Image: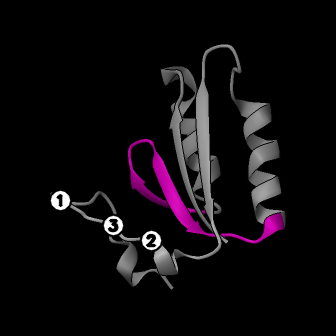
């Protein structure tokens, strides 16, 4: 499945969340990750986030698509990371 994950996390937890998510997804923008995942990987991410966020102060949204086949994106500006070269 293709996943887009966005978050609004307290500044004291942002780096830990970013490091954790980079193990599974491509970092697209400050609070945005995306990529292909298995169901097991998504479960690991959800479990890991539950351990790392403050549910009273932080917010995470995970969008799931069957694949990125039907996903149309428009990009403007300079991306932080070139994901086109990632294997």
Residue in the picture at 72% in, 32% down: 52
Residue assigned mark 1 = 76
Q: Residue at x 69, y 70 (%)?
A: 37
Judged from this view, the residue extending furthest toward the left is 77
Q: Which residue is mark 2?
A: 71
Residue 87: give x, y in percent of width and height. Answer: 51, 86
Task: Give the camera-side residue of 15 and 58.
Answer: 58
| Residue 5 pos. (x, y %) | 56, 50
Residue 8: percent from left, percent from top: 50, 30
Question: Residues under labels 1 and 2: Cα distance?
Answer: 16 Å
Q: Secondary structure at mark 3?
A: loop
Mark 2–mark 3 contact, CB under 8 Å?
A: yes
**Residue 33 lies in the magenta stretch:** yes
Judge left or right: residue 85 versus residue 48: left
Whole-Å distance between the Cαs marked 2 and 3?
6 Å
**Residue at the image position 46 percent from the left and 80 percent from the top:** 86
Residue 39: x %, y % from top left: 80, 66
Q: Secondary structure at mark 2?
A: loop
Q: Residue at x 60, y 23 (%)?
A: 58
Query: Quick one: SS at disc 1?
Result: loop
Foreground mark, 3 or 1, reads 3
Badge 1 vs badge 2, beta-carbon distance below 8 Å: no
Q: Which mark is residue 58?
A: none
Highlighted range, magenta: 25-39
- Label 3: how many Cα within 10 Å (few below 14, some 14–19, many 20+): few
Which quadrant would residue 59 be assigned to in this image?
top right
């Amino acid at each position: 499945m293709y996943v887009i994950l966005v978050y609004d996390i307290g500044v004291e937890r942002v780096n830990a969340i970013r490091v954790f998510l980079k193990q599974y997804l491509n970092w697209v923008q400050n609070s945005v990750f995306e990529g292909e995942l298995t169901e097991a990987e998504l479960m690991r991410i959800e479990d890991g986030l539950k351990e790392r966020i403050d549910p009273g102060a932080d917010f995470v949204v995970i969008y799931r698509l069957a694949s990125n086949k039907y996903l149309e994106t428009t990009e403007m500006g300079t991306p932080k990371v070139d994901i086109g070269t990632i294997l």
